[in-house]
Amino acid sequence: MPRYSEDEIIARVFAPIAGAAALGLKDDAALLAPQSAALVVTTDMIVAGVHFFADDAPGLIAKKALRVNLSDLAAKGAAPIGFLLSLALPGDWTNDWLDAFAAGLAEDARAYGAPLIGGDTGATPGPLTIAITALGRAERFVPRSGAKPGDAIFVSGPIGDAALGLAVRRDVALAKRLSAEARDHLIGRYLLPQPRLDLSGWLAANASAAMDISDGLAGDLAKLCRASSVTATIDLSCVPLSDAAQAAIAIDPALFETAITGGDDYEILVACGNGAVLPAPARRIGEIVAGEAPPIFLDAHRKPVFFKKLSFQHF
């Protein structure tokens, strides 16, 4: 069977999973009804060989592409409305690959209430590239720039699993020393982020500032502090680590720095009033303080810890 034409990709692959606002993908734009809440828009691109392995399952690639954007909406206190997809396909794509990609995308679009409402497709001489623009609505937009001295700092869940999952994919010796359960957990967290949309309402009601942790806890905290013109003190012994992450770090203690500075957590970093308490499994890890110096990271003995780099760098 010949590969789908561009028109067939739209009509056969993506139109069946599109939402009503997409108008059947028969127009050049989507039509959204006015909303009483704030409209929140975010976009993220993922590229084969940079954000995922080219031979990862196409359904998982699709889900990751959507979920990293839904994570941004969650951190802003927003609920999804829908998304736009731009897909640049390399020369070796197949109909089966595209069908599996669309099936994974459709499954998550239904699960998260985020229908496809439009986009574009094209060819590329480079690697597979996927760009999604997600739209959401929020009763109150939660900025990065609202953190205040005295605010408590929370993370919404375990840190470092995805970065360690990538390390396991790359390091055969490390993978062999971990249990199958630990390997599967860490690699699973790398392949399939879990956007914290369950926290959107709480954040809109309570957070001073928030952002999702995509490039590493240490580096993203520094970004939030710069945006808010404050600094922070972090107790590293309070940072939540999964059992699988602890097992990897026990094998190679240097992996603790990977966990704190690596990317792809997609948990949420939150600054909120000192009396506020996030729902479990969130953990308080520090405090916002006055000043504009870089955040201070302390070990269990209250001694400063310095990292070689604070986060994943795109360039």
Image (tube, helix red, strand yellow):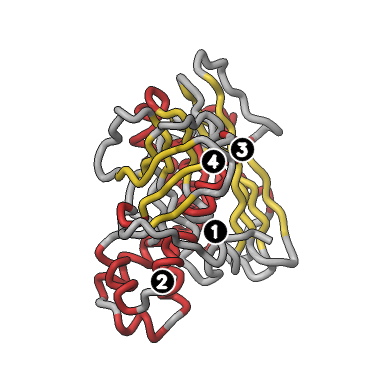
Residue displayed at 29% across by 75% down: 250
Residue displayed at 36% across by 80% down: 175
Q: Give whichever of discs 1 and 3 has the lower sequence position.
A: 3
For marks 3 and 2, give the one nearer the viewer.
Answer: 2
Residue displayed at 55% across by 67% down: 308
Q: Quadrant of the C terminus?
A: bottom right
Q: Give whichever of discs 4 and 1 has the lower sequence position.
A: 4
- The label shown at residue 255 is 2
Separation of residues labelled 4 and 1 (CA atoms): 13 Å
Is mark 2 in CB contact (under 8 Å) with mark 4? no
Mark 1 is on which residue type? Leu
Residue 292 in the figure: left or right of residue 7: left
Mark 4 is on which residue type? Leu
Q: Give whichever of discs 4 and 3 has the lower sequence position.
A: 3
Judge the density around disc 2: few (<14), some (14-19), many (≥20) Cα neighbours within 10 Å.
many
> Which residue is identified by label 4?
224
Separation of residues labelled 2 and 1 (CA atoms): 14 Å
Separation of residues labelled 2 and 4 (CA atoms): 24 Å
Q: Secondary structure at mark 3?
A: strand
- The label shown at residue 310 is 1
> Which residue is identified by label 3?
118
Q: Give whichever of discs 3 and 2 has the lower sequence position.
A: 3
Observer-nearest residue: 130 or 71? 71
